[in-house]
Amino acid sequence: AATREAQVRAMLAAASLIGDERPADAEWLLRRAYALNRDNFTVTNNLAYHLITHGGDASEAAALAQGAVASGLGRDPRPEVLANVYDTLGTALLAAGRPEEAQQAFERGLDAEPPNAALQLGLAEALHEQGLGAEARRAFDAIEQGALAQLSPGQRERYDRLGAAIAP
């Protein structure tokens, strides 16, 4: 079991190093790590996130992210961990065309870690996709300008796109 966990950790590390440079190889490593330990919510969450950020199947990513949330809730209740798995779940649900469920995921993540720019952005996107313009604008405006540095380049692009779409 210890050897298997060491393999999983090595695969996670390697996948994170090559993810953007060689996404197909990173996906292979993440799928292999997932096959070795389907109960490891970090592996499951990372595979789901990789799929949604690299053009994978959104429905598969949502199912994986739901598993990561279910597994992670009882194992690591730290706010930043809960925020991370709920952000992945919400983003996957949005990509799968399920904005109402995505809204719930982002709200749960914000319950765990309220000042989280990525979760707040996701919530604004989910509300916008539901046609709730005023609520989307309020959620968008709640993102503190100082927190924008926390957003990844991909999230920053989403922020800019949504800002243009909901501009008054």
Image (spheres, rainbow, N blue to C red):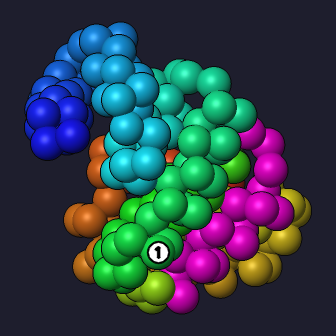
Describe residue 93's horizontal placement relative to residue 6 as left or right.
right
* Local secondary structure at mark 1: helix
Please say whether residue 30 is visible from this viewpoint: no
The quarter of the displayed image where residue 64 is located = top right
Q: Position of residue 160 (x, y in %)?
A: 48, 53
Q: Nearer the viewer, residue 90 or 151?
A: 90
Q: Which residue is mark 1?
A: 74
Describe residue 44's horizontal placement relative to residue 107 as left or right.
left
Q: Is residue 108 magenta?
A: yes
Please say whether residue 139 is visible from this viewpoint: yes
Q: Residues within 10 Å of mark 1 (few under 14, many from 20)?
A: few
Q: Tell which residue pokes out farthest to the front in this image.
A: 1
Q: Residue at x 78, y 79 (%)?
A: 134
Q: Residue at x 31, y 45 (%)?
A: 153
Describe residue 161's horizontal placement relative to residue 94 as left or right.
left
The quarter of the displayed image where residue 168 is located = bottom right
The quarter of the displayed image where residue 15 is located = top left
Amino acid at dot 1: Gly
